[in-house]
Amino acid sequence: MKTSTSPTGAIALTTMLAPIAWGTTYWVVTELLPADRPLLVAATRVVPAGLLLVAIGLATSGWRPRGREWRHVALLSLANFGVFFPLLIAATYRVPGGVIASFAGLQPLLVLLGAWLMAGWRPRGRDVAVGVSAAVGVLLVVGLPGGSLDPLGLVLALAANVSFAAGVVLTKHLPVPPDRIAHTGWQLVLSGLLIVPLAVVVEGIPSGVSGSNLLGAAYLGIVATGAAGVLWFNGVQRLPVAAPPLLGLASAVTGVIVGWVVLGQGLSLVQSAGFLLTLAAIGYGALLSDRRTAPAIDRPPERHLRERDGSTSARRSAARLTA
């Protein structure tokens, strides 16, 4: 009897490299990049990486968006970068970083909610329970902030995470691009058309840059945005929809490890419990990467497909969503 090995375990690991890179960005921004220039940081993340990926895509496959593909890429660029980055950056000015991380812990639940609203999928109770546990785990790690919080900052933080969750659902829902590298590059370039003018108007043109600024910008653009984006979108497209947001919790875990190793920060008993709970949620997400354990949310019932569209094209679209 021939035994087949699912390749999705490797996809889960490579997908998790993206949030691991994201987890290092706070240290890079604070140590290597200019202070109080968040929109400039966002622009340096999306534009150089986008141009590089587009150039690689044109050289290898020649693919670029055509016709309806432009609308798809534009929609994804807004959700994944163009709206997400400015909202997130604006929130960081108004609420503590721990609050931002707490909202990021809601990603698994937000993605399940978005998949339900967009496609009528009903997530299993187990998936919802793990999502709640993940949110609690991240909250225990970052702790509850003291004092009053800026209501607008809370709204911005929530809106940023809603935007990112919408990007996950849309990436899963829209047609698979023929060239993932070029597709990610075009998303970044289009988002730059929004972020760069905003940075110039709000923050102005920088007066000068240092070597450390260039090093930090290169890391954020090439590694933490360009390469991480390609790996992330590949995983979102190929894994069950509930898996990537759980794997994305590796960003919070990485941030804790960086703070522990580089900055000498420690963990209390409560934070350690939250850390372990978050790791358990990530492990569950990795198990979901195997098709044999894929949750019902990724398998729309035939009745739903017939009601939505009885055509062959609709069935093919549904097959894409379950991949």
Image (cartoon, rainbow, N blue to C red):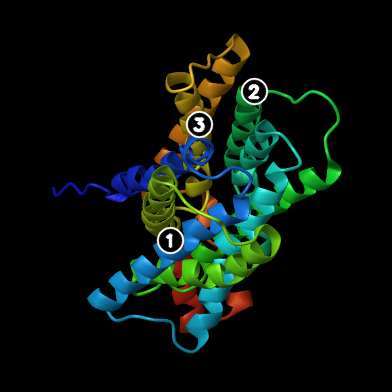
Q: Which of marks 2 and 3 is nearer the N terminus?
A: 2
Q: Where is residue 250 in the image (x, y as percent from the top left)?
A: 47, 36
Dot 1, how many residues are within 10 Å of its Cα: few (below 14), some (14-19), or many (20+)?
Answer: many
Q: Nearer the viewer, residue 304 or 287?
A: 287
Give the alpha-carbon distance from disc 2 to disc 1, as whole Å.
31 Å
- Circles 1 and 3 in contact, beta carbons < 8 Å: no
Task: Indicate the amino acid at tag 3.
Answer: Gly
Residue at left offset 45%, top offset 47%: 213
Name the N-terminal-most of marks 1 and 3: 1
What residue is pinned by disc 3?
255
Residue 12 seen anywhere in this rendered image of the structure: yes
- Residue at mark 2 to residue at mark 3: CA–CA distance: 14 Å
In-image side of 236 versus 7 (left or right): right
Q: How far apart are marks 1 and 3 (CA)?
A: 26 Å
Residue 18 location, x and y as percent?
41, 47
Residue 3 placement, left or right of 203: left
Say what secondary structure mark 2 lies in.
Answer: helix
Q: Residues within 10 Å of mark 3 (few under 14, many from 20)?
A: many
Q: Is mark 1 on a helix, strand or loop?
A: helix
Say which mark, if any, is on residue 314: none
The crowding category of the residue bearing disc 2, from other C-alpha atoms within 10 Å (few below 14, some 14 to 19, many at least 20), is many
Q: Could you say which is closer to the camera, residue 259 or residue 317?
A: 259
Report the residue marked by disc 1. Answer: 237
Q: Quadrant of the C terminus?
A: bottom left
Foreground mark, 2 or 3, reads 3
Q: Based on the displayed image, in which of its 4 quarters is residue 52 positioned?
A: bottom left
Q: What element carries label 3?
A: helix
- The amino acid type of the residue labelled 1 equals Gln
* Residue at numbered disc 2: 140
**2 vs 1, front mark:** 2
Q: Is residue 254 above or below residue 80?
A: above
